[in-house]
Amino acid sequence: MEKATFAAGCFWGVEDKFRSVQGVLSTWAGYTGGHWQHPCYLDVCARITGHAEAVQVEFDRSVVSYEALLNVFWNCHDPTQINRQGPDRGEQYRSVIFYHNLEQEQAARLSKHKLQLSGKYDKDIATEIQPAGEFYMAEDYHQQYLDKKRRLSWQT
């Protein structure tokens, strides 16, 4: 099993996209990329931690490649936006690929380069590529948030 970590705006939608990928074994919403130990949602929203809302993915490489996960990442948000996605604003919504090893770093840099050259966007891709650091799990109510909302709506 391998880990991959991505930040692409609000973690609710990002986690939901990755959960639907065959070969993804588990996902966690959380915070990473900052300087504050053990942040909570309010700390991150206050923009005092430097953390991004992120999703950590555990996946089976024999079923899904890291490159396939990169494609999900690129297609679930606008990577040209700086510190925002849709109506959400702030550094916690920045676009970042957090790599766990040299192979992931190289794949991330290559995929970003190819996407930039593809002409899909008329602006530069703002996605950062950084080494993965400490990942702090978000509060329980953030985990699989959209799935929980769908289940509640079916019950009413």
Image (cartoon, rainbow, N blue to C red):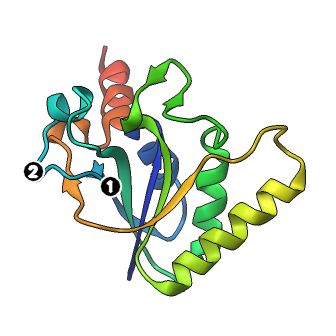
Above or below, 73 against 153 in this view is below
> Is residue 64 shown to the viewer in this render?
no
Residue shown at 38% from the left, 33% from the top: 146
Categorize mark 1 by other alpha carbons within 10 Å: few (<14), some (14-19), many (20+). many
Q: Which quadrant would residue 130 be assigned to in this image? A: bottom left
Residue 116 in the image, given as x and y percentages of width and height:
79, 55
Say what amino acid the circle numbered 1 marks. Answer: Gly
Is residue 63 shown left or right of residue 125? left
Above or below, 83 against 100 in this view is above
Categorize mark 2 by other alpha carbons within 10 Å: few (<14), some (14-19), many (20+). some
Residue 41 in the image, given as x and y percentages of width and height:
19, 34
Residue 74 in the image, given as x and y percentages of width and height:
65, 51
Residue shown at 82% from the left, 41% from the top: 121
Q: Which quadrant would residue 149 be assigned to in this image? A: top left
Q: CA distance from mark 2 to mark 1?
A: 12 Å
- What residue does disc 1 label? 33
Is residue 148 shown left or right of residue 59? left
At mark 1, the secondary structure is: loop
> Sequence order check: which comes first, mark 2 or mark 1?
1
Residue 62 in the image, given as x and y percentages of width and height:
54, 86
Counting every numbered tag in the picture gives: 2
Residue shown at 38% from the left, 83% from the top: 1
Say what amino acid the circle numbered 2 marks. Answer: His
